[in-house]
Image (cartoon, rainbow, N blue to C red):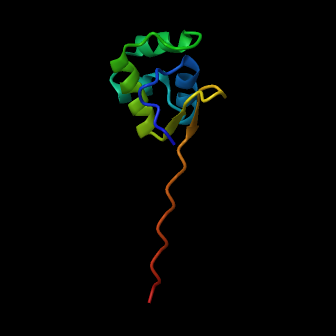
């Protein structure tokens, strides 16, 4: 899958990403080092946010590090989902 790290986040992606990992706006502000007011303002927009590229990348990076995967529009509209967890290594047989 192609990474979408250069596409601006939409307000819906931002809200949905936070909801998936049960983060408050304050949690996201701490994790991304982006101001709480900036995050709240971005979430109130109708579509694409008016965030700077640096804030967009910081927020995207924080959410991706927490397990959120961003989906490009590709005809179906932009979205988010939780990254599939990596399979655990099978335990070694005990002797």
Residue under the point 59% across and 21% down: 12
Total numbered circles: 0
Residue under the point 43% across and 22% down: 26
Which quadrant is the C terminus positioned in? Answer: bottom left
Q: Residue 1: horizontal and vertical position, in percent?
A: 51, 43
Residue under the point 50% across and 37% down: 68
Q: Residue furthest right?
A: 76
74 and 91: which is toward the camera: 74
Q: Residue furthest bottom?
A: 95
Q: Is residue 77 above or below residue 91?
A: above
Does 19 sit left or right of 7 as displayed?
right
Q: Is residue 93 above or below residue 78?
A: below
Q: Residue 23: horizontal and vertical position, in percent?
A: 50, 30
Does 61 sit left or right of 88 as displayed?
left
Q: Residue 91: horizontal and vertical position, in percent?
A: 47, 74
Q: Quadrant of residue 58?
A: top left
Q: Quadrant of residue 16?
A: top right
């Amino acid at each position: 899958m192609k990474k979408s790290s250069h596409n601006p986040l939409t307000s819906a992606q931002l809200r949905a990403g936070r909801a998936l990992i049960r983060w408050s706006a304050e949690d996201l502000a701490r994790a991304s080092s982006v101001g709480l007011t900036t995050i709240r303002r971005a979430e109130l927009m109708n579509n694409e946010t008016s965030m700077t590229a640096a804030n967009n990348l910081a927020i995207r990076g924080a959410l991706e590090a927490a397990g959120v995967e961003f989906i490009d529009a590709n005809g179906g509209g932009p979205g988010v989902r939780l990254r599939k967890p990596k399979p655990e290594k099978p335990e070694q047989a005990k002797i």
